[in-house]
Amino acid sequence: MTAIVTAQKPSNRAVIGIILGGIGLILAIVTGVQSGAVDLTWGQIWVGLTGDSSEHVQRVIFDIRLPRTLIGLLIGIHFAVSGWLLQLLSRNPLAEPGILGISAGASLIAVIAFVIGDWVVSGANPYNNTSPVLQYLPWFAMAGGLVAAVAVYLLGLRNGQLSPLKMTLTGAVIAGMLHALTTGVLAFWGHAHTELVAQWLAGSLYGAKWDYLFTLLPWTVIGLVGVGLLVKPLKVMQLDDQHVHTLGLKLNRWRAFALLIATLLAASAVGVVGPVGFIGLVIPHISRKLAGANLPVQLVFCVVFGALLTVGADVLGRTLFTPYEVPVGVVSAILGVPFFLYLLSRQS
Amino acid sequence: MMESEPTVRPCRLYALAILILSILFVLGLMAGSRWVSLSSLWAALNGGGDLLTKISVVELRLPRNMLGMLGGAALGVAGAVIQGVTRNPLASPGLTGVIASAALAVVSLRTLASPDAFWLPLMALAGGLVGGALTFVIAGRQQLQPERVVLAGIAVTSLATAVTTGLLLVSGAEAAELYYWLAGSLMGRGWVQLELVLPWLVLPLVVLFFMHRPFKLLQLDDDLALAMGLAVGRWRLTFLLLALLVAAALVAFTGPIVFIGLVAPHIAKRLIGSQIKHWLPLSALFGALLLLAADILARQLAFPQELPVGMLTALIGAPWLIYLLNTKQSPRSV
């Protein structure tokens, strides 16, 4: 029993994986700053970063690409870690904030808040891009995500036992309902903002500004601290419920805490960039494959590869079909759905 | 598989359903921003009465009601056929990815070209076929377990939804209108739309009703059906194609309306038990009833605004499905 709870050293393979992932992430960030409507050279970026270049290059780097890339990095971490927590918590390899309805709940409440907030301040110019409700959106999104998460979790239990299949189905049904409601709200009361909200609903980093980053950052910190606290209890939670009780862990309290942190991470990211699915599904699986059973190492993998996938997906999305942009949410769905199906085919 | 509960006599069910349906139909003609009394309704239908009443009743509410009824019937039958033929109580056009992919096809056509409305059902059908086929191919390897089919359908739906949302971003000025359509509504659907969709709905429905014998046999074991001289694979495919056809054609005009194809056949099956012969007609009636009622509610609840009917059916259908997942030990035994 103690062998499970004591810390393990990461294997060599894991260390190499993390280093490669880190290098990949740095490359992705540089590419993210470099490419776009105007491609910059390495030299231009270097000069731009050190603050010694034309105003044009400065603006492209600092006002557009750098915040966008960094936000991509953060939301990648958010969704990947959230999915990792959910999969551990529900012992369900198909769990993911999108599939369990958390993103849909967050979206619905955020869209309602957006529409109402807009209606309240309708004196202001409705076509002004900066919405007054932006800094509150993560809060609303979290409230919605939390309600959806708790509902799915409770309804997904089968006779008090965790049942992966039933939880996935319940989550998908609730997500479908919430999605229909969101579309309805947007279609009938979104009016002046349909385009803006539609872009948000597609999970796009287009137009991401420093404000977004600073709105999101506190939640990243809180979420990661929470996950840090959870690592040890999570290890114990991998055991049978009965074993856990004999070890004296207050199982339900920790489960609730884990669900809270997972929701907080996913919903705050949804509140800022909109629902981006499947990152929380794909990354934890890859992490488990590469890191083995060592939870802290898995967590580091999730952070690094979640960020890498999102930044990479954003770069792909904005360079593939220029001048059009494919939102991150669409790229991640196209990458993630086959993965989901692969997992499904392996489930007995 | 069969319900052991006491069953109701079918003829009473038909009578009751038709009675409620006609009351709803009249109510649907009367209700709206201007309530019309029974007498002026009669007058308007006979070509008299004042012009405003005549227009709102004959030009707006009548075709809308008929589309609601017909569409509900189509969804109910499509759901019953898919459930029966795949022997999967959770299957329905919505949960197998058909509606979402039909919607994707329509959105892409309307974004990339500005097509004649005539092409929309064909495009929706193509999309629905691809989506449905994908779902069943993905799920097919494990002998079509109910939950697995639904999970595969969820995957197909989420992919289609994501791509649809992405497409909406490049659709520019049309985005608001497309969103409106995606919410699923009967609002503003008049005689033109009804005429366009009519052949796509009525013909397959009639064909389906005439094929009730093979439908009944398909409920049995594959081996048994084969022994009774039924080319199981071919018939199953024919049934699925017809079901997809009506569902997709409807989606092309009303937008995605989910859960009716799930709920109506369930209610029908509960009431008739093992009398499979009556399953399709009753599913049609209940589907018509549900959609018509939902549409009338959608018009009245948030007056003077209208709610999209897709919102209401989702609000009714999702709890129903969760209830189904919870009442039985396994959804397979529903």
Image (spheres, coloured by chain):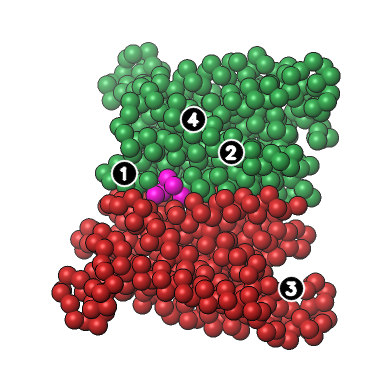
Chain colours: A red, B green
Q: CA distance from mark 1 to mark 2?
A: 26 Å
Q: Residues within 10 Å of mark 1 (few under 14, many from 20)?
A: some
Q: Residue at x 77, y 21 (%)?
A: B217
Q: At which x and y percent is residue B94?
A: 56, 39
Q: Residues within 10 Å of mark 3 (few under 14, many from 20)?
A: some
- Whether marks 1 and 4 lie on the same chain: yes
- Label at residue B322: none
- Whether marks 2 and 3 lie on the same chain: no
Marker count (numbered): 4
Question: Is A144 one of the magenta-colored residues?
Answer: no
Q: Earlier in the sequence, mark 2 or mark 4?
A: 4
Q: At which x and y percent is residue A340?
A: 60, 53
Label 3 sits on residue: A238
Element under disc 1: loop
Q: Residues within 10 Å of mark 2 (few under 14, many from 20)?
A: some
Q: CA distance from mark 1 to mark 4?
A: 21 Å
Residue range in magenta is: B162-166
Label 4 sits on residue: B126
Q: Chain of mark 2?
A: B
- Label at residue B134: 2
Q: At which x and y percent is residue B70?
A: 51, 24
Residue type marked 3 = Gln
A278 left or right, relative to A155: left
Q: In which quadrant of the rendered image does the C terminus of chain B lie?
A: top right
- Label at residue B171: 1
Marks 1 and 4 in Cβ contact (< 8 Å):
no
Residue type marked 2 = Leu
